[in-house]
Image (cartoon, rainbow, N blue to C red):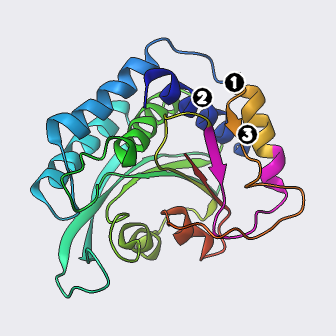
Amino acid sequence: MNKSGLERSGRALLVVLLALSGCTRKAKPDPGAGPRMLAYVRNLASDIGPRPAGSTAEAKARQYILAAFRQAGLQSQEDPVDEVRLSDSTDLVLHSANIVGVLEGKSPRSILIGAHHDSRNTACPGASDDASGVAVLLEAARRLAATPHRHTLVFASFTGEETAGLPGSREFLQGWKGPPFLAAITLDFVGTGKVFIAPFPRPPELWANRLLARAEHGARTGKVSFDPWLVTVPRLLSIPYSSDHESFLERGIPALNLS
């Protein structure tokens, strides 16, 4: 992971969001964005460290993210998640929470931008997976708070992505009372090389090809990749891991994972 990689991911995300919103405004480069995102990663992965779901460190990460959302001007809250299991083989139930921030729009639809703040249940600090995604999430919230947007933008930092069953994103959807979602974009393992956008585990719909081509052009980088994940003829690929966008696909909401 590096500053330029995080900048590429951030620019691609902004272009995708502006395209979904029907906005023609281009995402302008911000020389301070890369250092800010790298600082977010260091604060989460180094200062706080490993953040298994339900741990004291994860609680510190949640408060850090909540404060950043509020500083950016989002309507923000902590939503409890009470059914977190570290694996399918354990009966131990942990308690955690999602952090949700909202920028209200004028239309009756929402767009979800998500990442996950928990790390694996090991000594791994979770810098790439997924402090990097949270860093891009926080920077996008900061930038978009000052950008006109038609749809309501919902920024969610999920718990439990590294546990059994994606409980954070699934409980979020069960409890969501706001405008229905037009689309969802999740950020997982970003800033390490090419921007890789994929709709696994489902075959993509053809709208995604046009959107991602626009993202590559608008982000002003040749390092946005959607082949062979997104192809003219949709096909199903077997991917050996899951991420929170799958919870949205299960409910029929168009969703992409950006990594």
The dot on residue 11 is: 2
- Report which residue position mark 3 lands on: 19
Disc 1 residue type (three-letter): Thr
- Which residue is at 16% across, 82% downward? 92
**Disc 1 residue crowd, few under 14, some 14–19, many 20+, Cα 10 Å:** some
Q: Residue furthest left?
A: 56
Percent coordinates x, y for residue 179 in the rendering? 57, 62
Tag 2 near tag 3, CB within 8 Å = no
The dot on residue 221 is: 1
Q: Which element is circle 1 on?
A: loop
- Which residue is at 31% across, 51% downward? 117
Q: Quadrant of residue 203?
A: bottom right
Percent coordinates x, y for residue 198 in the rendering? 65, 54
Q: Whole-Å distance between the Cαs marked 2 and 3?
A: 12 Å
Q: Residue furthest top?
A: 31
Q: Nearer the viewer, mark 2 or mark 3?
A: 2
Tell me if 203 is positioned left or right of 158 in this view. Answer: right
Q: Which element is circle 2 on?
A: helix
Q: Whole-Å distance between the Cαs marked 2 and 1?
A: 9 Å
Percent coordinates x, y for residue 173 in the rendering? 47, 71
The quadrant of the image that shows the N terminus is top left
> Above or below — where is 25 with respect to 231?
above
Percent coordinates x, y for residue 241 in the rendering? 50, 66
- Which residue is at 22% across, 40% downward? 64
